Amino acid sequence: MCKPTIISREGDVSVTHCMDCKIVNIWNRNVLITFSFEQFNAFVDSTRGLQFDDYIEHHPDGLEVVILASPFPDISLVFTRVEWHEFFAALHQAVYMQQIYQMVQA
Ligand SMILES: [Zn+2]
């Protein structure tokens, strides 16, 4: 039976995982992204060090945003500056918590 645990929360972003199914869910308002543990770590590694200021584009309403390709074709993630920082803070906290869970389990 699936028992998701919240491993981080930052602003609108929550990250849960299930140790049995070995999946990570990133909940971000109306977007839910599901990764295997391996996919999650690969995603975090591939996005680590990205700077908001290096990728600024403009939303149709004029807001500065950064668009990040998602692992899924034709779906991109759009972040304001605040959302960007919340998203990656939540992810990095989740990685840290996963390491703790894996140490406890080992
Ligand atoms: Zn599960």
Image (spheres, helix red, strand yellow):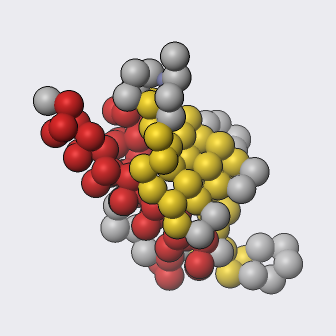
Residue shown at the point (35%, 42%) measured from the top left: 42
Classify 87 as above or below 33: below
Query: What residue is shown at x 59% (from left), y 78% (from top)?
Result: 82
Instruction: Locate residue 35, reporting x and y percent.
Output: 49, 34
12, above or below 71, in the image: below
Of 50 and 26, which appears nearest the observer? 26
Left/right placement of residue 34 relative to residue 28 reads left
Residue at horizontal 52 percent and vertical 16 percent from the top: 1
| Vertical order, 82 against 76 (above or below) | below
Quadrant in the picture for residue 25: top right
* Residue closer to the observer: 55 or 41: 41
Against 24, residue 48 (above or below) is below
| Numbered circles on residues, count | 0
Q: Quadrant of the C terminus?
A: top left
Say if residue 57 shows up in the picture: no
Residue 28 picture location, percent across and down: 64, 55
User: Which residue is drawn at the image coordinates 71% and 56% (left, top)?
Assistant: 29
Q: Is residue 40 visible?
A: yes
- Residue 19 image point, x, y percent: 37, 28
